[in-house]
Image (cartoon, rainbow, N blue to C red):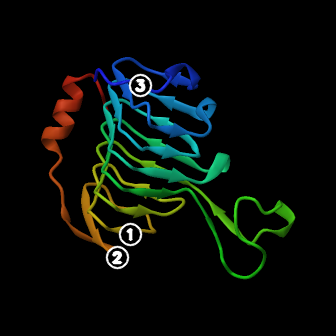
């Protein structure tokens, strides 16, 4: 943690015991709130609004795109593994207009905007892709290289493309430890 860090003063809010790598790119820092005990590693790229809770880890080379209309919410005790793509807005590609961020609004194809919400204790594995408007249920896990287009059920592990439920996840110890740290669900 002795590496150079991102300028926390640019953020709307930044808590204590927080490490943000200098190589992080946050396009709208005034729309980003970061809690306590957070580590955000090299190469994180964020173009959306974000509310990042406490005891969070965002691994290297994660991207979250969607512009100022998109949003990422990470509740306490959530993690995102390397290479994950969080898509908070997506062009429709239906031929109803032109596609891309430089196209004037009147000429654009349909765009889907949404908030991606990670409920407490949820985690995303390496190289997963999460689409706009998805809520990861409390304690749910998305396996490596999985593709999520719909909300997940609490305490369930999802894998595949498209992702499907695999099995339930144990929760008792995690909830007990969180309570010992002063957090309630």
Element class at badge 1: strand
Residue 41's image quarter?
top left
Q: Which residue is drawn at the image coordinates 55% and 33% (left, top)?
A: 32
Question: Which quadrant of the rendered structure holds the N terminus?
Answer: top left
Q: Is the residue under label 3 in contact with that under label 2 (CB below 8 Å)?
A: no
In the rendered image, is residue 27 in sight? yes
- Relative to 153, say whether 174 is above or below: above
Between 48 and 182, the one nearer to me in the picture: 48
**Residue annotated with mark 3:** 5
Question: Which quadrant of the rendered structure holds the C terminus?
Answer: top left
Between 167 and 19, the one nearer to me in the picture: 19
Q: Residue 132 bears which disc, if any?
A: none
**Residue annotated with mark 1:** 147
Per the model, the C-alpha gap separating discs 1 and 3 is 32 Å
Between 85 and 160, the one nearer to me in the picture: 85
Which circle's residue, 1 or 3, is located before the other in the chain? 3
Q: Nearer the viewer, mark 1 or mark 3?
A: 3
**Residue 38 % position (x, y):** 35, 29
- Relative to 31, say whether 180 is above or below: above
Disc 1 crowd rating (10 Å Cα; few below 14, some 14-19, many 20+) is many
Per the model, the C-alpha gap separating discs 2 and 3 is 36 Å
In the rendered image, is residue 185 in sight? no
């Amino acid at each position: 943690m002795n590496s150079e860090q991102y300028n926390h003063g640019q953020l709307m809010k930044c808590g204590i015991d927080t490490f943000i790598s200098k190589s992080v790119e946050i396009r709208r820092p005034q729309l980003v709130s970061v809690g306590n005990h957070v580590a955000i590693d090299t190469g994180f790229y964020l173009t959306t609004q974000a509310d990042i809770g406490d005891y969070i880890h965002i691994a290297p080379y994660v991207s979250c795109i969607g512009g100022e209309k998109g949003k990422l919410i990470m509740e306490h005790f959530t993690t995102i593994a390397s290479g994950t793509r969080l898509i908070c807005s997506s062009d429709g590609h239906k031929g109803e207009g032109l596609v891309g961020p430089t196209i004037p609004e009147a000429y654009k194809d349909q765009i889907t905007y949404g908030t991606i919400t990670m409920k407490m204790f949820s985690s995303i594995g390496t190289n997963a892709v999460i689409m706009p408007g998805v809520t990861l249920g409390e304690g749910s896990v998305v396996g490596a290289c999985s593709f999520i287009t719909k909300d997940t059920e609490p305490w369930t592990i999802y894998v595949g493309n498209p992702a499907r439920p695999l099995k339930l996840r144990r929760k008792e110890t995690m909830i007990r430890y969180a309570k010992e740290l002063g957090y309630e669900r």
